[in-house]
Amino acid sequence: MTGTYAHAAGFYAGDRPRIVTSRFEYADSHTIERYLATDGYKGLRVALARPAADVHEEVKNATVLGRGGAGFPAGTKWGLMPAGNVPRYLVVNGDESEPGTYKDRLLMERDPHQLIEGCLIACYAAGLSRCFLYIRGEMATAQERVAEALNEAYAAGYVGRNILGSNFSVDIVLHWGAGAYVVGEETALIESLEGNRGMPRLKPPYFPAAIGLYGQPTIVNNVETLANLPWLARNGAEAYTAIGTKTSPGTRMVAVSGHVKRPGVYEIVNGTTTFRDLLYGEEFCQGIRNGNKLKAFVPGGGSAPWFLPDQLDLPFEASQVGPAGSMLGSGAIMVMDETTDIPHAALTLTRFYAHESCGKCTPCREGGTWLERILTRIVEGNGTDADLEQLIEVGTSICPGDFPHASSERLGLSAVPFPYKMTTICFVGPSAYAPVNSALTLFPEEFAARVTKRNRIPVTAVSGE
Amino acid sequence: MSRLTDANVAIANEIITRYPRPKSALIPLLHLSQEQNGWVTDDAMKHIAELVGVTPAEVLGTASFYEMFKFEPVGKYVINVCGTMSCALMGSEELLHHAEHRLGIKAGGTTSDGMFTIEHAECQAACTEAPCLQVNYRYRFRMTPAQLDALIDDLAAGNLAGEIPPHGTLARVRQHIPADRSVGAVPPETPGQEPVWMNGKAAL
Ligand SMILES: Cc1cc2nc3c(=O)[nH]c(=O)nc-3n(C[C@H](O)[C@H](O)[C@H](O)COP(=O)(O)O)c2cc1C
Ligand code: SF4
Ligand code: FES
């Protein structure tokens, strides 16, 4: 059967091209010995043997889409830095904490040298002179592995001054967080790295590439994004784009959790693999547990509007999933079978975002808490039909206008495309409402059955909550 | 009491030099103090403020934003049961209730012997291995109530001391940047030039 390894819990290798997980079968994949024996640091040598601008061009040609959620091409992002403003920094986003997402931790624990090599290639290509590798606070083993790997790499001359005897010099500094989901948002990550409370910055500027860490041009890239670079440097953009589709080349790490027979982390071919392949395929999740029916699934992390079984044939391709009403986000699929209590499932996500609000914007700080409380009341059987209206009222104050959702033949709904409009600085606010909106739109009967009718009170008079 | 020890001050000073601005070292230093004392004490925050060159209020301002920093003593073992969607779908609420019942405390509480704290935690990036939990940020996957009982027994008996250090210790390996390999950090406002390798030529 397809490879599964005690040392990489949840990972299934399968018979597919592997760009970032190629060493996972080795129990010692995190050591420099194994890394060097399996093409390790060869990509760096290839890169350093070319002018930096050529390496940057190669990354652009490969269209390496960001794997942190927004899917912005890395090579293009690096090109957004204003000329002449130095120093420039690289900040690695290893704060993985979007509900359902499990891949960056695996990449840091199982192949830290691959990440380090990716950071070096990015710094070389984009002319970045210092790198901060920010690992989520709760990931003690990942911090240990990356620290060990950095110590090995410094000692062997791969990191630091005059790397491999060249004129390329860069320090990689391990940094670690202390528990706050919102710090994964790139400007909050920068605030946190400056030693502040991890609150997102007001936009514009939209990209820290212009004004980032200490006000300097800064590239923030996700762990998986950077982990692609050693393979790309060794094999070239043409080989990279030969995998996947033109708009979504390469592979993606995807975690499928919830009510499937074989929940797991899979490196899939980008753009072509469908949700049906993933949920039902023999080499992936092998169907719904106990032969149950699929009720709904979250296609791209806790913030993503939900899909129904009608959407199973969509491929893992942003340009198709967006118009269908959702997003691929961080490669996290959460599956609900027919036994799922939908309002309760929505609550477990809304509670997450309500708890993780940094408090900077009123609609998120207050609205998230309201949503959580009202939903809790409904789930516990104490809700009324006025509560349902209130949910929508609060939700639309965070996300005005039509909220993105999937189409449903059963309900005669046509999809409202992603993304949402919002009154908040970052996506945490809308994310608190996303599960509520999906659940309410797609499963209205489950809410109707849960609440009691009450004499109609004007909504404005219910604000004592 | 509970300022950083001399050995930890040496570690702290080395960490501070890695950043273009000292304040960036705040979170690592707060972790260091929590490793030393099991929680973040007022004296430690004052000491960190001196080391970094900010006010104690700024240290508290930053520290209080982050859930991992504890401002009063917690158990030797902090058990975080994940309650977010993937784990909830797989029965994490029963797991948390079982832990509460078994230890006789509510989530957020600490046992009177100071051994255990339980917390309702959010997604731990192990969603395929649900329901999961962490003990002092070391994972346990696909947990059942029976396994949780066994885990608590083992922790109480000291059987896992080798794998799971007391609360406060995260990574047991620290990064060392050898002086002869280090590029060094300069304040961002130092006038600089384009990196030397951005000269249109190959570096190797
Ligand atoms: C609330 C919020 C949380 C986020 N969390 C993460 C995260 O944990 N890891 C991550 O890589 N990106 C996260 N992102 C996306 C980052 O802001 C950023 O887009 C990403 O790190 C850029 O890297 P990429 O271009 O390589 O994807 C988050 C965004 C938001 C709005
Ligand atoms: S949307 Fe929420 S988490 Fe994001 S900046 Fe505003 S208050 Fe903070
Ligand atoms: S939901 Fe529990 S680890 Fe992600």
Image: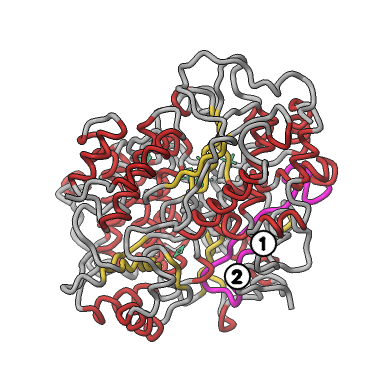
Give the answer, above or below, for where A274 lies relative to A400.
below
The residue at 22%/31% (across/down) is: B55
**Label 2 chain ID:** A
Looking at the picture, which amino acid does disc 2 mark?
His
A116 left or right of A211? right
Q: Residue at x 54, y 24 (%)?
A: A217
Residue A351 percent coordinates (x, y): 34, 57
Residue A258 is situated, as x and y percent measured from the top left of the image, at: 51, 70
Residue pictured at 77% horizontal, 43% vertical? A43
Residue range (magenta): A241-266
- Of circles 1 and 2, which is in front? 1
Position of residue B172 relative to residue B79, above or below, is: above
Q: Residue A273: x, y in percent?
A: 72, 59
Q: Which residue is mark 1?
A: A29
Q: Earlier in the sequence, mark 1 or mark 2?
A: 2
Read off the chain for label 1: A
- Residue type at mark 1 is Ser
